[in-house]
Amino acid sequence: MKYFKFLIAICFLGMLFSCGGDDDICESGEGTPRMKVAFRSLSNGKEITLDSLYVAVDYGAGKVQLGKLTNIDSRLIPLRVDTSPYTDIYFRLSDKGAESKVRVNYSTKSTYVSPGCGIKKYYENLNSELVTPNPVQKVDAGQNQIENEDKTNLYLSF
């Protein structure tokens, strides 16, 4: 019985000290940045706030719904992290409404961050084309590289 208590104490201490450090968690924006999309009025070119927006993205295995946001002036959208040179993004203003398809083309650059975060991708030479134009009427380029999530990369005109 004396050895059994000693064995349990050793196991408990081993579990206590085997916990990982801060390096296991990817914090403070060290991951791959998302693309920032803002919205403009087609008539005057000023930025607007949308009542609702539904976004879906094709990551290579079909569309993935990113959900609905209300009263927004911009949206952060994750792009593909595989070797594909483009990402298809779908926008709708209502749940069952018409859907616009925007193809975002880019080249990527990878950088090693840490064991917890792995590799961070940067997107360069962004250009976008409007494939299906309803409800989005026009796309305008913003900053053509994504290094962080501060600057707007794409403007959609409604």
Image: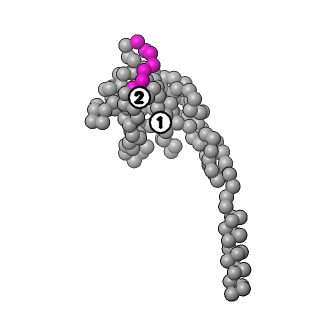
- Tell me the SS state at disc 1: strand
Color theme of the render: one colour
Q: Which residues are magenta?
A: 44-50
Q: Which residue is mark 1?
A: 77
42 or 127: which is nearer to us?
Answer: 42
- The answer to whether 144 appears left or right of 158 in the picture is right
Q: Which residue is mark 2?
A: 71
Q: Main secondary structure of the magenta part?
A: loop
Three-letter amino acid code at the position of disc 1: Ile
Dot placed on the residue nearer the N-terminal end, 1 or 2: 2
| Residue 130 seen from this side | no
Three-letter amino acid code at the position of disc 2: Asn
Q: Give the quarter of the image for residue 60.
A: top left
- The answer to whether 5 appears left or right of 129 in the picture is right
Residue 8 rendering spot, x and y as whole percentages: 67, 77
- The answer to whether 54 appears left or right of 141 in the picture is left
Residue at figure coordinates x 67%, y 61% from the top left: 19
- Tell me the SS state at disc 2: strand
**Residue furthest toward the top?**
44
**Residue furthest toward the bottom?**
1
Q: Give the quarter of the image for residue 2.
A: bottom right
Residue at figure coordinates x 30%, y 36% from the top left: 95
Q: CA distance from mark 1 to mark 2?
A: 17 Å
Residue 42 rendering spot, x and y as whole percentages: 38, 16
Check if residue 88 falls in the magenta segment: no
Residue at figure coordinates x 55%, y 24% from the top left: 143
126 or 5: which is nearer to us?
Answer: 5
